[in-house]
Image (spheres, helix red, strand yellow):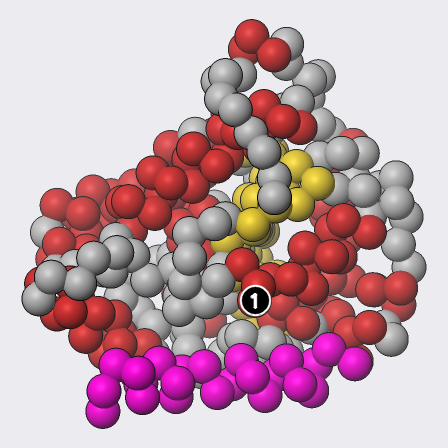
Amino acid sequence: MSVVEATRAVAREQVLVAMLGIPRLLTHQAWRAADPGEGRGLGVLLVPGFGFGDASLHMTRTWFRKRGYVPIGARIGLNVGCTTELVDRLERRLEAHAEATGGPVVLFGQSRGGGLARLLSVRRPELVRGLVMLASPVLDQLGAHPSVVRVARKLARLSAAGVPGLLDQDCFAGTCYDTNSAAMAQPLKVPAIAVFSRNDRIAPWDLCADPCAECVEVNSTHTGMGLDPEVYRLLAPRLAAWVRGREPVPAPSELPRRRYAEA
């Protein structure tokens, strides 16, 4: 099976869930009952899953915006690059958004995106108000379904052949893997929520149950979590509590000074 064929096979569930899940989400109370003052301008950085871009979290971004949060996408493309390089890029994005919104930001990641967000939370806890991980196998970076791991390894072989911007072998068994495995094992210093499902056929639920987070179980599929109204119903009060407990906004001089512009 080619990389393209394997990637399409992994993506089929995403397409099916998008077709079936959106109407149900849009008519659910968890979506329709929106208080535009709930978020009080708290920033949110959304990180997509492996092989997907910011568009995959469009509905999530809309849900946050309707409630007065300030959500932005990660701008890391299709999330198929080197782990360390992606975390570096996300760190710059986080710094800019924290400055733009006047304080620490919520990190919201799905699947691999949740793992990247966790690594970022360990690296820069002072800029993170809270962490949400949807179906993220953070207890084992290579613990996803074998079909997904095969795709990742094929991307690494393409990287070795000279294709830029992809995972490489160092991400599987090298300095990148060792460094990020050690960082992933570190305890969190920020409040966190790990959402998992026993119906997940991509990321085993027990690898998503981060002991440093509040673990929340739902009856969703892996890629369907971002379109599951039950996920939003459960997250809404928890996120609102983070807003209420938000620390005083730091002076601009206390945050990294970077130019920020949201397209």
The image quadrant where one finds the C terminus is: top right
The answer to if 13 sits in the magenta stretch is yes
Badge 1: few (under 14), some or many (20 or more) residues near its Cα, within 10 Å? many
Q: Amino acid at mark 1?
A: Ser
Q: Viewed as shown, does residue 89 lie left or right of 216?
A: left
Q: Magenta region's main secondary structure?
A: helix
Give the percent coordinates (x, y) of residue 47.
50, 53
Q: Is residue 237 above or below residue 103?
A: below
Report whether residue 222 is seen: yes
Locate residue 97 relative to residue 102 in the image: left or right.
Answer: left
Question: Would residue 235 appear left or right of 129 to someone viewing this image?
Answer: right
Location of the N terminus (image quadrant): bottom left
Residue lying at 61% horizontally and 39% vertically, measured from the top left: 262
Q: Residue at 76% across / 34% down in the picture?
A: 41
Q: Nearer the viewer, residue 106 or 188?
A: 106
The part of the image, by quadrant, that contains residue 160 is: bottom left
- Where residue 201 sits, quadrant-wise, is bottom left
Residue extent of the magenta highlight: 1-23
| Residue on which disc 1 sits | 56
The image quadrant of residue 119 is top left
Report helix, strand or loop for mark 1.
Answer: helix
Q: Identify the residue at image location x=30%, y=69%.
A: 143
Q: Position of residue 66 (x, y in %)?
A: 82, 51
52 w.r.t. 108: above or below: below
Residue 213 is at least partly visible in this image: no
The question of residue 183 being in magenta is answered with no
* Residue in front for this viewpoint, 161 or 245: 161
Q: What residue lies at 88% left-to-right and 39% top-to-bottom?
A: 37
